[in-house]
Amino acid sequence: MGSSKSSLRHIPNAQELIQDTGFSAAHIQRLYERFDLLDRDQMGRLRVPDFEAISHLAMNPIGDRIIAAFFSPGKDTVDFPSFVRILAHFQPTDDNRTRDSSGKEPYNSPNRKLQFAFQLYDQDGDGKISRAELLQVLQEMLGMQVTDELLQSIAERAIQEADLDQDDAISFDEFKKCLEKVDIDQKMRIGFLS
Ligand SMILES: [Ca+2]
Ligand SMILES: [Ca+2]
């Protein structure tokens, strides 16, 4: 596979993406090849059905939510730079790289990873995971295997454990506290990147 610098020339925003995301030139090159294969009409943009060809996402019970996270609000296509920025959340955290080139927290910091995961639950974007939103995710993940009563009681227990200020919803801070002991790098992997 050619991963020399010259082969990056035809890739939109390649150098900027390398700086912003921490992906190597070889990574960007490989992601571009994948993007190009998924981009069936060769317009330089992906639509929802293009993503469904990624088996890792098609098989994921919350794959639809992950796919939706690639799209900016109101948009129905994703260009290569946006595609790479979303995938950057799934890179293992790099402890030596705590700021990106513009001084922001990198996409693969534990905090940004958690923010990404949080918005998969918080579908109305009000900054809280409501009981209904939690139940919805649990239904997607476990729906076929368990009864409604069991789902309800799992949601109930999760809210009770996480909801420190007792507003009956899980804020980002509460979500973070709850997941402190979880290895987020381990949880947030995507086969596509390996
Ligand atoms: Ca919400
Ligand atoms: Ca709360």
Image (cartoon, rainbow, N blue to C red):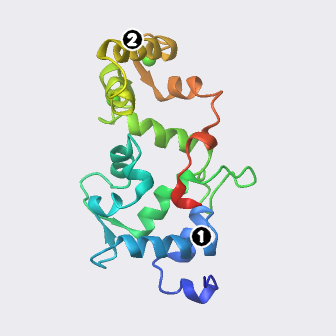
Q: Amino acid at mark 1?
A: His
Dots 2, 1 in contact, CB < 8 A: no
Q: Residue at x 60, y 50 (%)?
A: 108
Query: Percent position (x, y) of residue 29?
Result: 55, 76
Marks 2, 1: nearer the viewer: 2
Which residue is painted at 62% across and 42% down in the image? 186
Mark positioned earlier in the residue sequence (2 or 1): 1
Among the 4 quarters of the image, the one containing residue 113: top right
Quarter of the picture for ligand 2? Answer: top left
Q: Return the residue nearer the eye: 126 or 42.
A: 42
Depth check: 39 or 162 in front?
Answer: 39
Up-down relation of residue 43 to residue 148 (above or below): below
Residue 27's disc is 1
- Residue at 30 percent across and 74 percent down: it is 40
What type is the residue that disc 2 sits on?
Answer: Ser
Residue pointed to by mark 2: 153
Tell whether 181 sits left or right of 151. right
